[in-house]
Image (cartoon, rainbow, N blue to C red):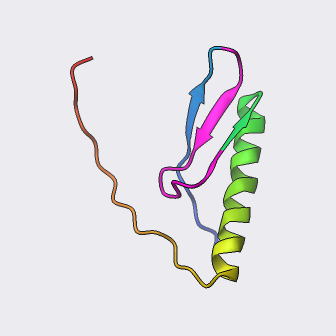
Amino acid sequence: MEPREFEITLVYESEGGFSVFVPELPSVATQGATREEAFANAKEAIELYLEVMAEDGLALPTVERGRVAVGA
């Protein structure tokens, strides 16, 4: 299988550590105490998710990216 990259979003948590979200795979979320741990956990979560999708014969969801501007 050819390697595929997934964008992740890291959110610093006020109590420490990072929450991680994968916009292309909305069911995938994880966390880590450090940036390095958060990236490693994201990689593992994505790999496990893709494994289950393949086992179940499911295709990856189609995701469209865009941006919305708001006054904040």
The span shown in magenta is: 15-29
Q: Residue furthest bottom?
A: 57
Q: Is the magenta stretch mostly helix, strand or loop?
A: loop
Residue 51 sits in which quadrant? bottom right
Is residue 60 depicted above or below 30 in this figure? below
Question: What's the residue at 76%, 55% (across, down)?
Answer: 44
Residue 16 sits in which quadrant? top right
Q: In the image, residue 18 lies at what x, y percent?
A: 66, 29
Q: In the image, residue 30 lies at what x, y percent?
A: 68, 43
Q: How many marks?
A: 0
Is residue 60 depicted above or below 47 in this figure? below
Residue 39 visible within the image: yes
Q: Which of 48 and 34 is in front in this view?
A: 48
Quarter of the image for the C terminus: give it: top left
Question: What's the residue at 63%, 33% (across, down)?
Answer: 19
Is residue 56 depicted above or below 72 in this figure? below
Q: Answer left or right for 32 relative to 58.
A: right
Q: Does the magenta stretch include residue 40?
A: no
